[in-house]
Amino acid sequence: MESTQLNCDMSSQQEQNQQKKKRRKSTLDTTESHIQNDSKSHLTVRWRTEAERRIYSSKLLEALRRSSRTPSHPGKRTREVRETADRVLAVAARGRTRWSRAILAKRARLLRVRKVKKQKSNGDLRLPERERRWKLPEVEKKVKVLSRLVPGCQKVSFVNLLEEASDYIAALEMQIKVMATLSEILTATGGEVSGVAGTDGGLSS
């Protein structure tokens, strides 16, 4: 009888310990989930703040003023404005996201390439290998397309891709608003960037 009672007590104790472990794990998972969600929310919301928009506007206007001092072809000028806007946006992200680091890294690579003499077209240039093509499920196709649209996210997990895409979209929305306002101001001032007054060019309004 005593042996049976002892076994029952030990079994009961083990069950209690297992339940405690499950509750502890559940609490930790919930806490970690809250932390991750708060972090994601903070990354996305910060692009919608007036302070962040003002900082981006000021840096973008300053960068455009510097680049406007060098005359260039209209087509090339349009590309330079686009590259400048993206680069300033990546700098504003402070390297916290993969997409911003990818944009800055691409910029650094382009600068290095421009310093190197163009190779002769005598077969030295190697054509990129063709990507293997195979049929993918519809969802995977869309994920693949999304990974190509978000800089630096072609080899990340699906969860990380969604996080990066959410932040990138929020950043682009802010960029569009700022550049639309800048376009209106430049139209009013005759297209002269140097004629835009104020530290942030009035873009924060």
Image: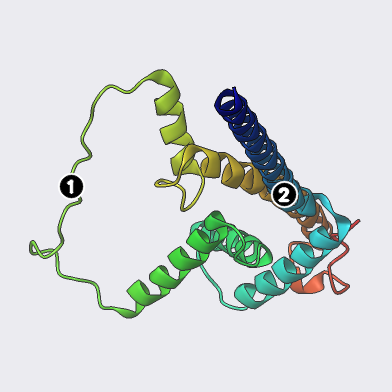
Element at badge 2? Answer: helix
Is residue 98 visible to us here?
Answer: yes
In this rendering, the answer to whether 141 lies above or below 199 is above
In this view, the residue in front, 105 or 3, is 3
Residue at position x 86%, y 62% in the image: 51
Q: Nearer the viewer, residue 190 or 165?
A: 165
Residue at the disc numbered 2: 35
Q: Residue at x 46, y 42 (%)?
A: 157
Image quadrant in which you'd find residue 16:
top right
| Residue labelled with disc 1 | 129
Can you see residue 78? no
* Colouring style: rainbow
The quarter holding residue 15 reads: top right
Measured from the top left, where is residue 198 in percent x and y? 88, 73
The picture places residue 14, in percent across and down from the top left corner, at 60, 34
| Lower position in the chain sequence, tag 2 or tag 1 | 2
SS for dot 1: loop
In this view, which residue lies farthest toward the front?
1
Q: Amino acid at mark 2?
A: Ile
Locate residue 30, reporting x and y percent: 71, 40
- Residue 195 sits above or below residue 153 on the image: below
Quadrant holding the C terminus: bottom right
Disc 1 residue type?
Answer: Glu
